[in-house]
Amino acid sequence: MLLVLLAVSFIVYFIFIVIPGGDPAQRIAGKVATQANILAIRKKLGLDQSFIVQWYDLVKALFTAKLVSYSNQTNVVDQIKQGLPATFSLAIGAGIIWFGFGVLVGTISAVTAGRISDRAITALALIGISMPVAWLGLILRFFLAGDGGSGVSWFPDGGYVPLSANPAQWFYHLILPWLTLAVLFIGFYGRVLRSNILDTINEDFVRTAKAKGLSSRRILVKHVLRASLIPIVTLFGLDFASVLGGGAIITETVYNLHGVGWYAAQSIASEDLPPLMGVTLFGAMFIVVFSLLVDIAYAYLDPRIRLS
């Protein structure tokens, strides 16, 4: 994991430095700054050092929680911690929705393959996959939240209420963000699981279970579905980790949730390297950790797989 994080940090820093206008000192000084101002800022931030020294100092400051933003001098680790409650709330709720409904939709579609219900689910899944998250979020806000011009205000128009402050309002404010983020994954997971189930039905262990006289429901749940969930678990682990690591940038920005994704969006807009470095490594850490958890889950889902 440390090697992965170091590699990711190096790539992020390299891309930031080589892009046009990649001098943070020049951006901080402004368009009318003198060369002396730029040199002073560059020296203060340590940007007059060699490339490797700058990268090492940045990574060291991040891992010691001393990394500060170039634009407003706030502590990057503290800002990420402040956004964690909103991001975790969004990711956990949306993850439960998209995993649960994805499995349900995929199973129903596979069991009724070729029928009208299967075709209807397929059409709805394709629609869900095709809808851009930003567009869906704005549409839901316009028609269901706030004033928006639709005359309907069933849900709050964005914002985040901490769970500890008011659990009911916390849930109420996150309903639309949860649905917005989950719709894309539900359709995709449903299609993948349907294909896996139809393939697994023809496996030898399924035919053996039928020969033993087991009920169709037991075969589906205990044998077919359990083996078919392995690719879904892989997808869920990586997708959930990505959302936790700032992958919900669009959803958090549309609903003004002020989580890690929103913080990343603000940093991108201002081209502020330290926050981008912090958020990127934060997301990479989650992806590596959840990849390990997915490997462990394999042994439980498929008896043919055992961890040595």
Image (spheres, rainbow, N blue to C red):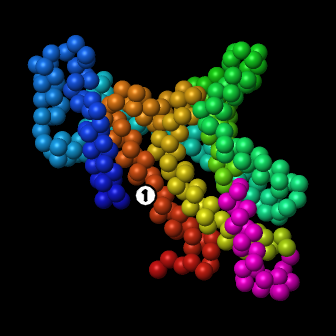
Nearer to the camera, 112 or 22: 22
The residue shown at (34%, 30%) is 271
State which quarter of the image contains the N terminus.
Answer: bottom left
Task: Judge left or right: residue 14 versus residue 287.
Answer: left
The residue range painted magenta reads 190-215
Q: Is residue 64 visible?
A: no
Task: State the residue at coordinates (71%, 73%).
Answer: 200
- Residue 216 appears at what percent x and percent y? 85, 73
Which one is in front, 145 or 296? 145
Which secondary structure, mark 1? Answer: helix
In front here: 143 or 84? 143
Query: Based on the displayed image, in which of its 4 quarters is residue 289 positioned?
Result: bottom left
Residue 138 is inside the magenta segment? no
Is 203 included in the stretch rendered in magenta? yes
Measured as percent of width and height from the top left, residue 157 is found at 64, 22
Q: Residue at x 50, y 48 (%)?
A: 242
User: Where's residue 99, x and y in %?
Assistant: 66, 53
